[in-house]
Image (cartoon, helix red, strand yellow):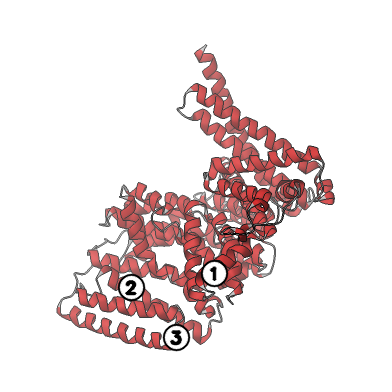
Amino acid sequence: MHSVSKNAADIIIRGLEGLILFGGAGIALYHFIYVFTTLQGSTEHYITHITFGVILCALTPMLKTLKSERTRHKKVVATLALATVLLLGTAALLYMRFYARDLEDFFPYFEPHQLPIGIMAIATILIMTWVHWGPTLPLLTLVAILYFFLGHLIPSEGVFMALNHAEFDPYYVMGYLGLSPTQGFIGWIIPVSANFIFLFVIFGNILLRTGVVEMFLELGRAIGNVLKPGPAYAATLASAMVGTVTGAPGANVVLTGSVTIPAMKAVGFKGHHAAAVEACASTGGQIMPPVMGAAVFIMAAFINLPYIEIAQRALVPALLYFTAVAVGIYFLVKSLGINPPKVQVSHLMIWRRLPCFFIPLGLIVALLIQRYSPMYAATLGTLALLAVSAVLPETRISFKKLVQALSEGAVQGAQIAMVLSCVGMFSQVVITTGLGAKLGEFVIGLTDGTLLPTLLAAMVICILLGMSVPTVPAYVLTALAVGPTLVGLGVDVLGAHLFVFYFAIFSTLTPPIAMASIVAARIADAGFMRTSLEGLRLSLVGYFIPFAFIFHPALLNFPNIGMEGTIALASTLLVCVTYSAASYGAFGTHLSTPLRFLFAAATLVGGLYLLGYGSMALTGQLLLSLLSMAIAVWRHRKCPLPATA
């Protein structure tokens, strides 16, 4: 009897594996075909996208449950629960798909029997988001939904009177949350998921199977043979280039860190140092053009700017961040006295695999510059990638690997669709109830409407929200909460959104959560808190960069940054050097405590200039920097550090 049940379970597992593999690949192909052929209307397409997302997001944990070591009873209960959610959610979404036009035409008036349809769809999305992303965002969204229904019961006088809103009919609320095919969990955000993010996620999965990770690691080793930090620069380059496509710091740490962290440890880096380098580089991949992960597509729709314009204007701050990390790594290596050996590099492999990265991405960028839609650019870029990779045996993708890439990309895209649906409901509540304006008034009340304190408050809010949820929802939530407030204080719209975007990302480096550091520490077998603090130390100058482009907006005008942008750029680079020297206690020689304080003073004054304190701060930065460097050079002649190369 036991063997019979085991055989039945094995059959179900194999069936689910095949369904996810080929079903996921089919869903991916559907999205690519839709780019060129209008299989159905756009509204129906978005509902279909969410329906496919629910199916994949229910089947994957079902398969994981059946493969787990749980008891038979727990497996049965969990599987039945997921199957129930799958059936009810799919039924509700199919109803919305086939009656989409009626629901759209009669919005916001609905029949009583349609109310359970909306409840089933909303509950399914909340549960699937919980399963794949944890409880924080679904609980926040649930609180927002309850606020939409019951916010009129909050007393209109007293401490919480600002949260009171008008009473809404339940059908009106449900229409805005879960029954309208153009509002709520579909709204403005799911079109971005269906048309842009999904396709780029699949592109990234295919790209990773051409061997570009190994190519970038090899390229990093070549750079490391010329520059002192060796494998650390290999990690930085590989993680930045891979991270711009994947847009997920945790996954990026696993993907590249499993190679780069052991390589750094092998040449003398301590575990927490190697893990910190990888965490900083993988996190920064999300701000690196040309792709910048998934959140930038949401930003483009949010502020109605072409995606390519955002990527172009965000280039200088991204390069500043990686320059800050690179300078920090250099001084870290100097202070530790690490002497990485030169390694043999396969330049032939680099040149043979480089086209698989640059030709498809170059085509995507060129199409975006020509104002083609991102969905069209991503599709042609994917086709170009398959064509280029097929030329050489080592980059050629077999049919089996292609199907796996399509399926895994579809699963990842489905998970993102769930979290975005959750964010769509949350944002709908914020917009319809006027909660966003009330949050802005609250922040301004705390900071007296002064820009710098408001930016500091916004930074704290972004980091706190970003610690608990992924980058995309963290960006959207913070953009809704503080974006309009910053714009109201005179900040450029793009600058305001990039500001919250940066700090939503930096939350993955900020203790006590620091998700990127957690993953890197596990790979390095290092202490989490020590890794987290080291990552913060290495990337701290990066926390100044969003303030710098707010107070010096010319930094966001690449390639026309002008004199103001050039001076701000030079000041930031100088801060990178003086901060790293003060932090790691080395500048050609080991620095005495007073000299480290002098470098720190130069950093502080330079930071004040970046925070908008004018020419006096800039003059002070230059004088203190020159003085501290001159003393350090003089001491270096008397007592140089041991050579590290």
Q: CA distance from mark 2 to mark 1?
A: 34 Å
Q: Secondary structure at mark 2?
A: helix
Which residue lies under the disc numbered 3?
Answer: 614
Identified by mark 1, the residue type is: Gly
Give x and y (percent) for residue 101.
83, 48
Query: Quadrant of residue 492 in the image?
Result: bottom right
Tell me if label 3 and label 1 are in contact, CB under 8 Å: no
Task: Report which residue position mark 2 lands on.
Answer: 579
Q: Residue at x 50, y 64 (%)?
A: 502
Residue 107 visible in the shown view: yes
Q: Which residue is mark 1?
A: 445
Q: Which mark is residue 108?
A: none
- Residue 179 vertical placement versus 267 (above, below): above
- First in sequence: mark 2 or mark 1? 1
Q: Secondary structure at mark 1?
A: helix
Q: Secondary structure at mark 3?
A: helix
Q: Amino acid at mark 2?
A: Tyr
Q: Image point 23% across, 80% down: which residue?
A: 632
**Amino acid type, mark 3:** Gly
Quarter of the rendering occupied by the C terminus: bottom left
Tell me how far mark 3 sits from mark 2, CA to CA.
20 Å
User: Which residue sits at x=35%, y=56%?
Assistant: 532
Q: Nearer the viewer, residue 618 or 214?
A: 618
Which of pointers 3 and 1 indicates the residue nearer the eye?
A: 1
| Residue neighbourhood size for the residue with mark 2, other residues' Cα within 10 Å, grouped as few (<14), some (14–19), many (≥20) | many
Residue 353 visible here: no
Do the CB atoms of the residues marked 2 and 1 lie less than 8 Å apart? no
The Cα–Cα distance between marks 3 and 1, rounded to whole angstroms, is 26 Å
